[in-house]
Image (tube, coloured by chain):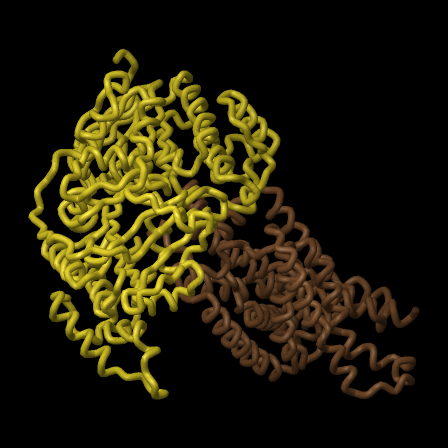
Amino acid sequence: MKYVLDFLLNAIPLGMTFLYGSTGEILTEKAGHLNLGIPGIMCVGAAGGCAMIQALVLAGNVPGVFIVLLGLLASFLAAGLMGLLYSVLTVSFKANQNVTGLTMTIFGAGVMRFIMAGLGQQNHAYLKALPIFRYPFSNLLPGTSWQYMGIMVYLAIIIAVVASLVLTKTKVGLHLRAVGENPATADAVGINVGAYKYGATIIGSGIAGLGGLFYIMNYAGSPEAYKSIETLGWLSVALVIFALWRPHLSIFGSALFGALYLAGSYIPSIPAFQQLGLPMSFTQLLKMLPYVVTVIVLTISSVRNKREDQPPAALGINYYREER
Amino acid sequence: MSKPIALEMKNISKSFGSIQANKNVSLEVYHGEILAILGENGCGKTTLMNMIAGIYFPDEGQVIVDGEEVVIASPKDAFDHKIGMIHQHFKLVDVFTATENIILGVKDAAGYSRAEAEARVKEITERYGFHMDPHKKIYEMSVSEKQTVEIIKVLYRNADILILDEPTAVLTPQETEVLFNVLRRMRDDGKSVIIITHKLHEVLALTDRVAVLRRGEHIGTVQTAEADENMLTEMMVGKKVSLNIARSEPKDPCDRLTVSHISCCDHEGVKLLDDVSFTARSGEILGIAGIAGSGQRELLEAIAGLQHLDSGEITYLNPKTGETVNLRDRTPLQIRELGVRLSFVPEDRLGMGLVGNMDIVDNMMLRSYRKGHSVFVDRKKPRDLAMEIVENLEVVTPGVTTPVRRLSGGNVQKVLVGREIAAAPKVLMVAYPVRGLDINSSYAIYNLLNKQKEAGTAIIFVGEDLDVLIELCDRIMVINSGRITGIVDGRTAVKEEIGLLMTGSIPAATADQGKEEGANG
């Protein structure tokens, strides 16, 4: 029982990394743009946030609240800038979305490595702000797995719920979905297609960027943590499919993905498991779980072929007005 | 007419490149009337209406709404002037409900309230007698339901002038009657309704006035009560124009391809071809006349093995062996090898016949690559063929290695038709081969077809210009809504007669030959 609780306290916060990424990606995809740059954008978000936090920590005497707020803001803006770049290329210049996205991922990962190497020269001072990000449990129950349940966990859930409400209950959401489903129709009724695409991509990228910062400052909390962000970013893209393009389903999906991702390393560390004497290759199989589950969900949703569960109809297709 | 004028168009002209779509058109529409814009396809009906709906912008002329000159540069401007158009291809978001589609893009005065929007939709539905479930998703709807959503969408934006582009093309007779009742109710409510159509009986049944367009020009407007079918047909097709296309007598024609009782439906269950029977003979050009989208494309594709048939048979008499073959059981490739060639020039010329990014030689090879025996392709013969076509058909191109997409439309067409003819087909099908071509290129194509005819090929020619059909073809078959309404002799045919057959004003005549064998296939 002790292991179950401990496992959940690790898995759920880990999942929030995916939740940030997938909420951001869902917004972008709802506008009809398949942003494969999300892993790179999360990297840039992490680097931007850490750089700001490090600067504030080294400046000294900055209240914790400001460190958190400015850190989040810097992360959001850095990632949003990547979203702007992606939008300029794919919305205005109509570049191929897949190629642009993959380029953004490679570029973003490189930018992060460069910045993190720079931050490392001052001993990764941003990690000193770790207790602030892990508020309140780092003070209440120090040293336990509860510490991972920091403020950004709740922020992720709030953002996902708000995104879900905006998409389903407001006119802005209705217009955004129309743009992603059928941009020609949206254009014909006077919706500014370009503005919605830019807006959704930039805000979505910003949200995804917070996921990168979250992983370092709330979950992993180590100087080496940044190296895992790109991998986690790809899982966020998979989570979008798993959640059937719905942010509120993504909340549960992210917890599940967190659990599945963690299972591969956590389960072998349980003494009871070690006594079973299973071969090492079995633990490698466990690490496949998130991907296997995504394939299963994709298969089931394809077979059921329910229209509401399909990706936005115009996903990945650039919109040319002249063709109407 | 005592009713006030709602919309006035003055001297509107519009060209696309060298093609004049509308020339000096002046029209007025009154409040509380139903006006028909009548004309053959390609006469500029839709272009004219698109200019007041904000899709196109006129080159010249004025648009006056309720006495004030306006500029309509986008569909939104049109809505602002209370003009709404229901296009043939619906602009709806499939996964949205009817209500969501209707309210899309409308600026709400006081915040967005789903309940209020639904109440308004309900009010409009009841006022005009629509039948619509506001919560039904578009993808679950029939074509007629989707059309209803489009109409309500326009009414929701307070449109006073409604333009419907071929609204009955996709409807069953019962649905058409329901639609007409709704339109009459709108007229009685003071709205102006404009319907674009080529169906004479609908014009006579529904409208108050008819404006006839021909080749982009406004021929005249008449009160429907004073009009009849003969008069409108004559206005539509005009007097015969002599073109002096050479036509030789068919040399000992024999049956080459017999189509008997074929039918097929689209995925919505609408009949595309309905019990079509005819025979194509060797050494003869069989013309097919009809309003665009009456089933010409499906018919040619059925013969080429590209269209699934629900019933009927297509028998091909192989002149080499004397055997008869049922093409319905054959794959498109087998059909091609029997010598049946489809040179289809669809709306998108490059779409079906040529690969735009490949050069002329490579496009020739698309038809010959199977012939080689070595692993490597033989580029010599296709190159010779390409050079020959470029020379004989006077294709204007920098060279045979120029990508086809860089050629002008007419030259692309010459390459396509030239390639199909070079395969020495036994049956050659061409659809709109001169669409968009200048006069000289058109005559070059007619000559090519005539040469093939003299060589004993059975030619099926789908055309849109009746004058050309009458001068080029030995027999002309007329198709209307997937049914053959008559087959006439090209030498004695009269334009008005074909026009009436095209619009379905004459009940289906019996086909020229009563081929009954295989009718149960």
As drawn, the residue found furthest toward the top would be B2
Q: Is residue A129 visible?
A: yes
- Quarter-of-image position of residue A309: bottom right
Relative to B349, does residue B142 appear above or below in the rendering?
above
Q: Nearer the viewer, residue B408 or A313?
A: B408
| Side of B151 relative to B433 (left or right) | right
Residue A44, position in %: x, y?
Answer: 56, 71
| Side of A258 relative to A278 (left or right) | left
> Chain letter for yellow?
B
Relative to A314, does residue B110 appear above or below in the rendering?
above
- Which residue does the image show at 82% across and 88% down from the upper left? A279
- Quadrant occupied by the N terminus of chain A: bottom right
Query: Chain A, which colour?
Result: brown
The number of numbered discs placed on residues in the rendered structure image is 0
- Which residue does the image show at 44% across and 61% down from the upper left? B329
Residue A252, position in %: x, y?
Answer: 74, 59
- Quarter-of-image position of residue B489: top left
Q: Nearer the viewer, residue A237 or A143?
A: A237
Q: Nearer the viewer, residue A125 or A106?
A: A106
- Which residue does the image show at 32% across and 26% down from the upper left? B203
- Quarter-of-image position of residue B252: bottom left
- Which residue does the image show at 28% across and 72% down from the upper left? B363
| Side of A163 relative to B448 (left or right) | right
Residue B53, position in %: x, y?
Answer: 33, 36
Q: Is residue B66 visible?
A: no
Q: Nearer the viewer, residue B307 or B194?
A: B307
Residue A231, position in %: x, y?
Answer: 63, 75
